[in-house]
Amino acid sequence: MADASSQSIDIAANAQTVMAVIRDLAAYPEWAQAVKDVEILETGPDGHPRRARFRLDQAVIKDEYELVYEWAPDDLSVTWHLVSSQIQKAQDGSYVLRPHGDRTTVTYTLTAEPSIPMIGLLKRKIEKVIMDTALRELKRRAEAQSQP
């Protein structure tokens, strides 16, 4: 597996609000532009999504893939792993939340391995665009959710 890429963003919302947005996978098509559909395939005993299928359509990147999630008991992190995909051999990711009162720093870490060979520089550029977009859209959604 390739090296992980990581980025952080500060969000003007408490950690509970941010994690609620992250956990609501079924709502991703409402705010994550590239995500066209999400199907929750399995939930854990805590009611959190355990396995989900995503349909992604962003310009030249189209994929249907399944992820398995592990939610931390303290509600401050989540990790996921790829189960199947049309264009990826592997994907591991995480969101880690660091609360600061009514603000939260979110760190997104992603390691993805495409099915086709790709130059490392191009792969890192694509990961950066994916993370930039995901964090910006998460910030927008969580801050809107935290408004009275």
Image: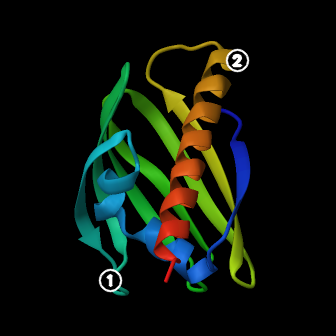
Name the image quarter holding residue 24. Answer: bottom left
Name the image quarter holding residue 50. Answer: bottom left
Amino acid type at mark 1: Gly
- Residue 3, above or below 31: above
Percent of width and height locating residue 80? 49, 57
Asked whether, in this view, residue 88 is left or right of residue 135, the answer is: left
Residue that carries the numbered disc 1 in the rendered image: 47
At 49% from the left and 68% from the top, the residue drawn is 144
Seen as rendered, the residue at the extreme right is 100
At 49% from the left and 83% from the top, the residue drawn is 148
Local crowd size for mark 2, using a 10 Å CA cut-off: few (<14), some (14–19), many (≥20): few
Q: In which quarter of the image is the N terminus?
A: top right
Question: Residue 118, can we see it?
Answer: yes
Percent of width and height locating residue 124? 67, 27
Question: Residue 1, can we see it?
Answer: no
Percent of width and height locating residue 74? 61, 86
At 57% from the left and 78% from the top, the residue drawn is 72
Tag 2's secondary structure?
A: helix
Amino acid type at mark 2: Leu
Do residues under tags 2 and 1 come within 8 Å of each other at their CB atoms? no
Of residues 44 and 12, which is closer to you in this image?
Answer: 12
Asked whether, in this view, residue 141 is left or right of residue 54, the answer is: right
Residue that carries the numbered disc 2 in the rendered image: 121
| Mark identifier at residue 78 | none
- Residue 3, above or below 148: above
Disc 2 to disc 1, C-alpha distance: 39 Å
